[in-house]
Structures are given as structure tokens and as C-alpha cells.
Image (cartoon, rainbow, N blue to C red):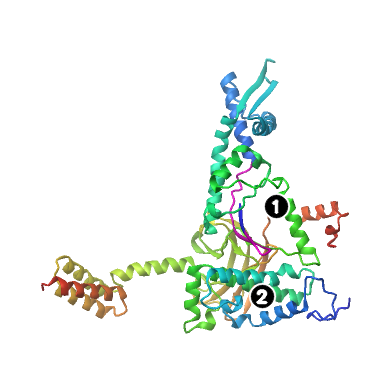
Amino acid sequence: MNDQTPPDGSGLDLPDNISPEILAAVEIKAASLDESDYFQILEVPTDADQHQIKDAYRALARDFHPDCFRNFPVPEFQAQANKLFKRINEAYFVLRDDAKRAQYVAGITGPQREKKLRWSDESEAQKQAAKRRNTLERMGTTSQGRDCYQLALRAIEGKRWAEAVRQIKMAILYEPQNEYFKEKLSEVEAAAKNGGNG
Amino acid sequence: MSILEIRDGSFEVLSVAGDTYLGGDDLDDQIVQWLLRDFRKRHGIDLSGDRNVILRLRELAEAAKIEVGRNRIARIRDDVFCRDQNGRVFPLDATLTEAEFNKMASAIIQKTFKVCDEALQSAHLNPSEIDVVILVGGPTRLPVIRQSVQHYFGIEPLSSVDPDKVVSIGAALQAYALTSRNSVGYRLLDVTPITLRIGTVGGFTEKIIERNTPIPIEQSKTFTTSRDFQEKVKLRVYQGESNRVDECELLGEFEFSGFRVAPRGEVKIEVTFEIDSDGIVNVSALEKATGLKASTTIQLSSGLSEADIEASRKNNMDLPVAMGESR
């Protein structure tokens, strides 16, 4: 066999279990990987359920698992086949898990779609930091905000609704992004309407 | 334990779990301990420090285990078992009943089912959703084990395959699939069994590739330097399920340097772990700003070393598969 054998399968003595069509398909799919999202890579609609995802994965694995190509040891082709199937596995791994899938969909439907085509698990350190931020926000992230909020809580205890509303609104002035304060405000305003006094 | 979904010729591994401390030897050890206790009670002599005695007891224990499995009772006898300094001979004479043996085995069996729980949980399945149970290894012939399996899964384990041959039959089928030039109609879709991690500051690790991820696979995470004007980073690759370094196993490490020197947090380094379908791990570090890269290769060993495999090949040269051929 001469060294200049082209990697597209033409003119080669291919074994029965490798077809030129599949070889070509590998090259085509591998070329478009970096512009595709996981749904496109698995060839499923974005509302696919778990059964469809599994069936699609199984069908792709039948034709494109690297073990299919052991009798075609052309280095450039092997590199593409591996790159393709690694991405197929990655897509399957994310889409078959509901939580990961939700995170992924949020990423690709947002403004930074091109950057979010590959899913990456939030680091454990980041997760801890997010949890800590969450806890802090509930009480206030600025000292003035915290103080007003504390006064509001005391007013709530004493059912002094007007005062509570005043204090939370002040807290929100200091922390306009604090969603917990805003939620508490609606709660207190509702209670004021029902409760009556002040 | 491995859980597979077999459908349309595809053998997809859903999860793998294991306890390397469980096995037939452990049942033998239980019997040995029991024999030592019995001997001590009868003759007031503690033989647990004598290596030769332990070796002999292991042989007797293994035979007794098999006999108890067959006949529900085993008599362990050695009339000249040991001798003291005065030449006085002490015989060994103990009777192991099935009940006594089952008691010993139960602690080990409980551990086995903990492994099953773990594997089922990872695969999001209940024991009742398993359709077939295949037992692997000689010890699984013991009635107590078959009964426990039947109780846990609600079905009887398959008895049409020899538990001592199961692994080699599977390996042979896979070898055929890999070397055949014909379509075989089945394909193994394997996973990585243990989470791969990278060491970070403070004795912690960060997960890069989760266990039970289908392979081949590649995953990346971006990190930053932890000290101002750091000149090099040491990348340590671990495997394990804990995020603490002292609870994981170090697989390898390499140094990455030559990147931009800057205050901490400003240098972004993308670390990529790649596992190929032969279980080889490639780890690379990339400074995104400059494209500077370094990498290393780690072999995930699972049993035989390269030398063992080569020796096995040489010893079987008359088989076409050893020559890399197939019909």
C-alpha cells in the first residue's frame, strides 16, 4: 500500500465494517463541531425527551464510536473520529441530566451563545461562593441596608406595618439590586393591607 | 459492580461501583480468624502471629468454604497441626456449619449490597428495574450469595454462564469486535469509573471529569494563579470521590511555566483532561492569552502492566489475535 493513500477511503481496501459514506460523514460532522450546540450534535430537537436523546445517542454510537475505525488507522482520520465522538459523549452527558441540561439551555439561549456551546461545571469553589452570597443577600450586603432591614424585621414582629414598609423601602434605596428585600416588601405591603393598623 | 443497558446491539455502561476490599479472600480470612479463635479457646494458644500457621489455615479455610457451599457443613481436621517447644502436638479440629459460615459472610455481603446501592443510585435505578443479574467470580457460587442476590433484586441470578469464565468470555467478545473486519452487531460503550480531579490550593481538589462519564471524553476548566507574580503552577492529577487531597490518589503531576507573570487572579489557565477509548489520560494546560501550552500523559492502570500484556502476547503467539490479525 503506498504512502500517499488519501484519507477519504477511495482506492483503499476497506474492511466490510467501514463504508466510504461513514468516513465522509465523520469528516463533515467533525468540521462543524465548534459551531454546533449539543442538540445539533446529537441531531435532536431542543424539546427532545430522555428517550429521544438516548435513541439518538445509541444510533450515533453505532456508526461513529472510535472502535468502529480500528481497521482504518490513518492518523488524521483517527484524530477527527476521536474529536467527533468525544463531543458526542459530552453532548449526551450534559443533555441526559436534567439539571445540567437546564443550565446548558440557559447558556445557549442567552446573549453569549457562542461562548456557551461547551458546558463547563461551575467549580466547587464557585458554588460555595454563590451559596455564601445568597446567605449574605438575605440580610443585606451593606451595613446601612442591614440596619434598615433589621429595624423592618422588628417592626414586622410588632405588626407595625407602616414602619416596616418605610424601613424596607429605605433598605432598598441602599441596595436596589437586592431581590430578597423587594420580595419582603411585597409580603409586608400585603400584610399591611390585610392586617389593618398603622 | 457494573450496570449496563443492552439494546439494539449497544452495550452501554450506565454506572460502575466497586469496593476493592471485597472478594473471595475476605471470606477465607473470616474463616481463618474463626479457626484461630477456636484454637485459642481449646488450647489457650494464640497462633495469630505465626505466618506459616496462617498460610496453612488459609488453605484449609478455602477448602472448607467450598465444602460448606456444597455440603452445608465442613470438617476441618489436621491431627498434627502444630507442636510446642516440648514436642507436644496440638491437633486442629473444627466443624464449620452453614449457619456459622453465613453469619461470617453476612458482614461482607452487606458491604456488597452497599456497592449495589451506589451503582443503582448513579444510574438512577431501583433494584427492581434490573432485568438480568450476572454473577462474576467463583465465590458467587455459594448458596448464601445467590440467595442474597435473589432477595435484593427480586430475581434469580443467571445460571447459564460460568462465573469463572464470564470475564474472559466478555474480553474475547470485545477483542473480536475490535479486530474484526466484519460488522459484529454489538458495541461496548464504556465509562470512566473514578472521578478525575486537579489539586487546588489549601489541600482541596476540583472535579474535572466525573465518574461514570462515557469515554472517550474531554472536559476543561479554567483556573487562575493563586499568588501574585506566580511564575509556575504545579498541576497534580488525582482520582477519587472526595474533594480533599488526602482522600484521593495522586496519578501524576507536571509543571507549567513561562506564562505571563502578573498579580494573582489575572492569569487564566485552562486545564483540559482527555480520556481516550483505551483509558489513557492526557492532561494539558493552556494560557488562553498567549496560547502557551504544556501537557502530560497518564496511564490509568487497571490490572495488567504493559510488560504483563507483552508477556501474555508472546506466550500466545500461535493465536492469530495475538498477531493483531483476525479472520
Q: Residues within 10 Å of mark 2 (few under 14, many from 20)?
A: many
The residue at the point 79 percent across, 69 percent down is: A71
- Residue placed most toward the observer, B309 or A70: A70
Per the image, label 2 sits on a secondary structure element best described as: helix
- What quarter of the picture does the C terminus of chain B occupy? bottom right
Subunit under mark 2: A
Q: Give x and y (percent) for residue A161.
A: 15, 72
- Residue placed most toward the observer, B90 or A159: A159
Q: Give x and y (percent) for residue B238.
A: 59, 60
Residue B54 can be seen in this image: no
Q: CA distance from mark 1 to mark 2?
A: 29 Å
Q: Is residue B61 above or below residue A68?
A: above
- Residue placed most toward the observer, B293 or B215: B215
Q: Within the magenta stretch, is there residue B22?
A: yes
Residue A175 can be seen in this image: yes
Q: Is residue B148 above or below residue B235?
A: above
Residue segment shown in magenta: B5-23
Subunit under mark 1: B
The residue at the point 60 percent across, 83 percent down is: A35
Q: Give the residue at mark 2.
A: A84
- Residue placed most toward the observer, A98 or B287: A98
